[in-house]
Image (spheres, rainbow, N blue to C red):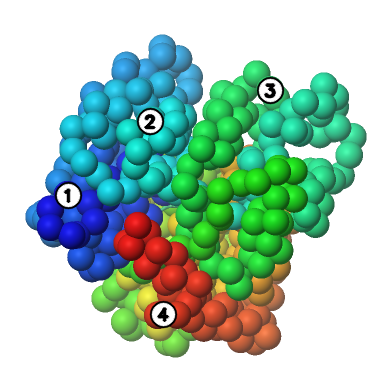
Amino acid sequence: MSGSNPHIAIIPNAGMGNLIPFFRLASVLLSNNCKVTLITGKPITSMAEANHLNFFLTKHPKITHLEYQILPPEPNSKADPFFLQYNAVRRSTHLIHPLLRSTTFSTIICSFLGCGTIPRFAVEIGVPCYVFNLSSTKFFSFMMHLPAILKDPEISDKKKNSSFLEVPGLAPFDMSSIPGAFLNPKHLMAVDAMVNAKACLEATGIITNSFEWLEPETFSALNSGKVIGGTLPPVLPIGPLEWYEVEEDQTDCVAWLDNQPHESVVFVNFGSRTPMSSDQIREMGKGLERSGSRFLWVLKTTIIDKDEDRQEDVLGVSFLDRTKEKGLVLRKWVNQQEVLSHPSIGLFVSHCGWSSSTEAALRGIPLLGWPQLGDHSVNAEVVEKAGLGKLARSWGFGLERLVDGEEIAAKIMEMMGDGKLRSSAKKVKEEAMKATEPGGSSHRTIMKIVGS
Ligand code: UDP
Ligand code: UDP
């Protein structure tokens, strides 16, 4: 340790939804006079990750960056490249141990995803270790209860036949919001969640990119031991994490937004790794056009990086021509935090990745949730319950069904005209800000970590 400044090692897993909150955490720690060492695996999967990592390190030269070579991915050419990477990082956790021994850290913070052996190793070397949950706390509570859920040999059948899933201390989960992979004890997602849930028991605490006001019953159920039927390390809110400076938007979207009226634009963006099928793109285009709203649509047709197709091949020249006065379609990475801060944004159509959901909360932007995979559906329920947005339940989960343009138009018009929702979303913003201000629950967690 240098002087009395705490030296904190932070260990994200792969993917933008993981890196961005860790970068935000790092900048909060730096502004509280901590030394920060960032530990990442290489190689990295996407251009977005490589670009953001480089930019972040350039802007924060005080951060020490340590890398470890991850094991080669298991051959499975059909799997999503982000999934392969996540699995490779998960299998490589032991390669982080020597790096954690190489310096005297005062605290270790690792991602829940793939945390595996790290909390136990931290106990061995006598360093406090926090596990960072990047999903909604509600989804985290489901994962913590998963070992008990999967003891039921008939759970897969229950997925087919029951509408609800019980997690003690919480209102029942809608069974349709839980992806089948988590209820199959042989699936990697379920296996890894169970390993990580067990690993959490050895951590000093769990931190979660959420705030008490947003998920009060969940924090209370976890912290009273109801969820796992025993004592869990304290589950502490830390969010929504404040934004750090990211590279200025490289597209022309901010200039375009500057010319749009207050709260008039529907912003459509499904995160860093969720493409849309060509049929659904056609219906989405129809929906946006029929809604009569202005729109900024970040269109993604591939899971990872480059979209090779030309705009007109995907959407048709006539669509682009008809909507050019009202809409802007981009096929690039946009600076989403800058877009969501723009006063012209009136609605965010989102897959409900948790980072996107917390960004909407911090800016009080009403969110139309259209979950695509993983935790999205449970996250969308949290968003809806808090009054930040609505979950488009009848649209199904991911590719379950093709959603018709007329339905999309009707939902957008309903939500753009919903003054009550606009006010309740602003209330969420006020509460989010209170949580992160001095004295707020999330601020207190940061002070606790910095002091440890
Ligand atoms: N993001 C962005 N620009 C884009 C797409 C995504 O800045 O064009 C950011 C977004 O603001 C969020 C993160 O990437 O911080 C995506 O994380 P999230 O958990 O919402 O979804 P994921 O990409 O993991 O599905
Ligand atoms: N992109 C992606 N995943 C990411 C980041 C970007 O699929 O994690 C896509 C993005 O939607 C766009 C393309 O990559 O289609 C180009 O991204 P970017 O502008 O970052 O790359 P560049 O054109 O600068 O090489």
- Residue 154 percent across, percent down from the top left: 85, 24
The numbered mark at residue 124 is 2
For badge 3, the amino acid type reads Pro
Compare marks 1 and 4 and give the one earlier in the sequence: 1
The amino acid type found where label 1 is placed reads: Met
Residue at screen point 63% across, 40% down = 143
Q: For the residue with label 2, is its CB less than 8 Å from the closest atom of ligand 1? A: no
* 207 to the left or right of 395: left
- Above or below: residue 86 compared with residue 347: above
Residue 430 location in percent, x, y?
A: 51, 83
Residue at horizontal 38%, vertical 76%?
341
Instruction: Give the distance between the C-alpha atoms of the residues marked 1 and 4, in whole angstroms.
Output: 28 Å
Q: Nearer the viewer, residue 83 or 298?
A: 83
Position in image of residue 85 (x %, y %): 38, 28
Amino acid residing under circle 2: Glu
Which label's residue is closer to the chain start, 3 or 2? 2
Of labels 2 and 4, earlier in sequence is 2
Real-space Cα distance between discs 3 and 2?
Answer: 30 Å
